[in-house]
Image: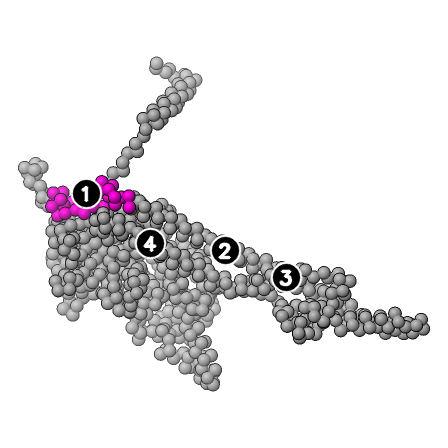
Amino acid sequence: MDTKNTHKNYMNLTDLLQQLESPIIIRPTRRMTQGELEIYLDKAADILRGNADHSEFRGYVFALLFYKRISDCYEEEVRTKVDALAKAGLPRDQAIVLARDPQNHHFTVPEHADWADVARTAKGQLGQALNEAMLSIERANAHRQNNFDGILTGKIDFNKQDELPRDKLVNLINHFSSQTFDRAHVSDDLFGNAYEYLIRNFASKAGKSSGEFYTPAEVGFLMAEVLQPRQGMSICDWASGSGGLLLQCIRHVKKHGGDVKQLKLHGQESNVTTYNISRINMILHGIPVWEHKQGDSLRDPRHVTAENRLKQFDRIIMNPPFSLEDWGHDTVVAGDKFGRLSYGMPPASNGDWAWMQQIAKSLKDADPETGGGGRGMVVMSQGVLFRGQPEQTEEEDGQNQKADAEYLIRRGFIEADLIEAIVVLPGKLFYGNNVPGCLLLLNKAKPEARKGKILMIWASRHFQKGNPQNLLRPSDLMRVLVPWQAFGDLAEAKRLVPQHEAQLIREVEQDRDSRLADIEDAYGPVLEPLARLQAELATLEALDLKVQAVKDAITPEHPYFHPLAPLKADVDRIEAEIAAAGRGDKGALKAALLTPKAKFDVARKKLVDAIKAREKQLYRAVKELLKLQDERDTREQEIKLAVEREINHLRDAGADMLRIAGSKDEARRYFTVVGADEIAENEFNLNLPRFVDTFEPEKVLALNTAAEKLQLATKASNAARSQLSSLLQIIGVEVAR
């Protein structure tokens, strides 16, 4: 209650009672935080889990979520435009027509396809209603640059009751209907991040095929940092999955102040469901233009020139399926019209080197004038580093053996000086595949100082163990980025460590600040009245509401009792007259006192009861808001502690990197630069343990410590042997002495 003006402008009792009795909204609706939105989407996935194949299953959820988002955003835009036009004096019916003009919107949702209307469809007709609404939305947006063709209907049929039982579909519709997903409730960044989280969630539960559509964000970040894309560049992912690697390149350009609108983005994906998810992912992240194709990149590359040659790009970033068996050997065995396999024909049962040659062919050639050229980074099975054998003669091994295809291709890449760096990663990083992978950096325009050399980084020692997947922390990424940028130079690495440490700490702190701001944006408006309500409660709790205390406290200036002052004055006046009157007049005056005294008592009781009720209401409201405040504080503290741990990891890693860079022998355990001659001596085998000291040193114990351990072990062994001997004797088994 606002009592600021009660000292100057008295309220009558009725107004004061109304104000005291006005309801307090204990828990108004607040915007969801990023974490809550992620939990909310998890629940949506849980509704269907177990009833559909994972590929179709994720298709249903992603299509419905996108449908709900664009429907809510479209209706929000319409409402805003209608209000503005009506305020300008246009009749409301005309304002509605103008507000729905497709030219005024990023995308259009036809009236009959509005989510709210379709969601109310009877259960038996719901599947068909959804199919028709989504087809209608696609047609309504067909004219746009990134049209919706197939984005909501490709391989998605809501009438498939064997995959999607009606009860589950209704539950899913009701779940999404319980929240509003317009921009006022969920920003583009917030929703886009949550969508990526949901993609990661599906990947973690999808089994072996999850690697087809998702690369862990930490790996993508590392790849973008090494590739260093810039505005104006053309970037391609021939196995684009859900689009996460291209988004990492976009973030890198944004972080360095570049204009992402000047990026020329290209992607191709064979799986229709995954292809549509990536299109939705880009739209939700506000990426206006990118050239995305659906199809098998090895059998039918779709990014080609007018002369039907592969387009060439400034940057290629990829995580293709590991060791793909059915990669398209049958389509190129008689010859590849795109000229990709100039280094050799990969084995029919393994497509790793087919992907590698596609990347090499579609990277821009070196430009002697500008020094520019294409660079590509790809996630690969470590088998590409060592599979295949060189030619063996009868004198060498007693038999004649031709060189294997993979050996010849790898040798060709090395001799062409295409490989600039190799990074061996920890195991269990990639969903659906526990085999340790590696990153290969290809460069068609190596700097002069790096020609004829390959940087090898053994990055499999440092990671955070997780279930089901391990994670790379910022400190682990620094252990790769420093030697990469220094290209193995120890003095340069020592110089770079503080820079990278400071930069990564800044990024961790920026992420912390963003997450804290997200929480404050969600909780702040709800908690805003808390201080005022606490102050009002404290004021009411301090009031003495006993009868005499109230009478004594009544003044025209009292913030709560002032309406009683005129009534009390009437009672006091008559009582004073009674006291001053003679015996004969007292009776009449006492009778005259009854009505004012009754009015005063009734008014006092009403006011006291209202104050007590208000106090109870305030107590409940403050208690609820304090609970929300504790909830906010707990979440903020969790974020701060996690970031503090991350920063400590970075500082520890920085100190360790300085130690490593101070010793050639120690550095060799983590990274090294290998020349072409040494690689040739190793028969073009790039398996890192041939060049990097990957063996963990044995722990050295002091002699007295070792003796104590041996003594304890001997005692334990003798005790166990004695117990076993006793048991054998009990069961009648003769024990040999």
User: Contact (CB < 8 A) between labels 3 and 2?
Assistant: no
Label number found at residue 260: none
Label number found at residue 691: 1
> From the viewer's perspective, is the residue at label 4 or at label 3 nearer?
4
Residue at 26%, 51% in the rendered image: 495
Please name the amino acid that badge 2 sits on. Answer: Asp
First-in-chain label (1 vs 2): 2
First-in-chain label (1 vs 3): 3
The residue that disc 2 covers is 633
> From the viewer's perspective, is the residue at label 1 or at label 4 nearer?
4
Q: Secondary structure at mark 3?
A: helix
First-in-chain label (3 vs 2): 3
Residue 337 spot, x, y in % from top left: 13, 62
Residue in front for this viewpoint, 378 or 551? 551
Residue at 56%, 62% in the rendered image: 530
User: Contact (CB < 8 A) between labels 1 and 2?
Assistant: no
- Above or below: residue 608 compared with residue 104: above
Q: Is residue 448 left or right of residue 144?
A: left
Task: Give me the C-alpha separation between circle 1 and circle 2.
Answer: 51 Å
Query: Which quarter of the figure is the N terminus placed in?
Result: bottom right
The residue that disc 4 covers is 502
The residue that disc 3 covers is 537
Task: Give me the C-alpha separation between circle 4 and circle 3.
Answer: 48 Å
Q: Is residue 435 left or right of residue 77?
A: left
Please name the amino acid that badge 3 sits on. Answer: Leu
- Residue range corresponding to the magenta coloring: 658-686
Q: Is residue 210 magenta?
A: no
